[in-house]
Image (spheres, rainbow, N blue to C red):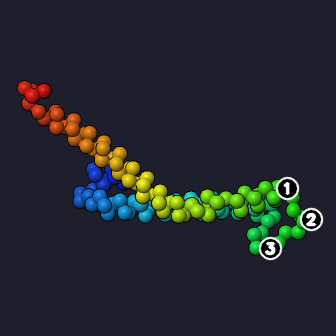
Amino acid sequence: MAALLVNAFLLKKPIHPIVLFLILSVVSYLVYLLALYCDDLESQRELHKLGIDIGREISAEEFTPQMAKALQNYTNDAGRTLAPISGLIMTPIYVLINFGMFYLCRWIVGLFRRTEKMPEIIK
């Protein structure tokens, strides 16, 4: 939303709305992927804290209930696996919703500005 406000009111030559939509969609998707990567690192940190290395086998003697729970949380997280695909779909939708809210507010403000300029007889 901030980029829309800057584009509309602060830039001398505003960026075309379609180009701005594409730029914001790509930037939002990259931020989304960065958040997913940080979440994945957090999950892996939990595993490493318990001494679990994804690449090696764990013997039954060293397997604890905490390890089982951490491994189950890591491997059963289907959202983590499919999140980049769903983000590719949802990010432009969220950007489009922000565009819609911005242009709706701009249209409403434009209506009020037009009614203020009307002569006293018409009001």
Residue 49 in the figure: left or right of residue 37: right
Quarter of the figure with the C terminus: top left
Q: Are marks 2 and 1 in contact (CB under 8 Å)?
A: no
- Pick whichever of labels 2 and 3 is earlier in the sequence: 3
C-alpha distance separating marks 2 and 3? 15 Å
- Residue 81 position, x and y percent, is 62, 64
- Residue 25 position, x and y percent, is 41, 60
Identify which residue is drawn at 70% across, 59% down: 76
Label 3 Cα neighbours within 10 Å, binned few <14 / some 14-19 / many ≥20:
few
Identify which residue is drawn at 53% across, 64% down: 85
Task: Residue 65: give its label.
Answer: 1
- Residue 50 position, x and y percent, is 80, 60
Q: Is residue 92 above or below residue 109?
A: below
Task: Residue 120: give its label.
Answer: none
Identify which residue is drawn at 23% across, 59% down: 13
Q: Is residue 30 above or below residue 121?
A: below
Question: Which amino acid lies under the numbered mark 1 shown in the image of this protein?
Answer: Pro
Q: Secondary structure at mark 2?
A: loop
Question: Which amino acid lies under the numbered mark 3 shown in the image of this protein?
Answer: Arg
Residue 41 in the figure: left or right of residue 88: right
Task: Residue 61: give its label.
Answer: 2
**Residue at mark 3:** 56
C-alpha distance separating marks 1 and 3? 18 Å
Question: Which amino acid lies under the numbered mark 2 shown in the image of this protein?
Answer: Glu
Q: Is residue 123 above or below residue 40?
A: above
Q: Secondary structure at mark 1?
A: helix
Quadrant of res 112: top left
C-alpha distance separating marks 2 and 1? 11 Å
Q: Is residue 47 above or below residue 122?
A: below
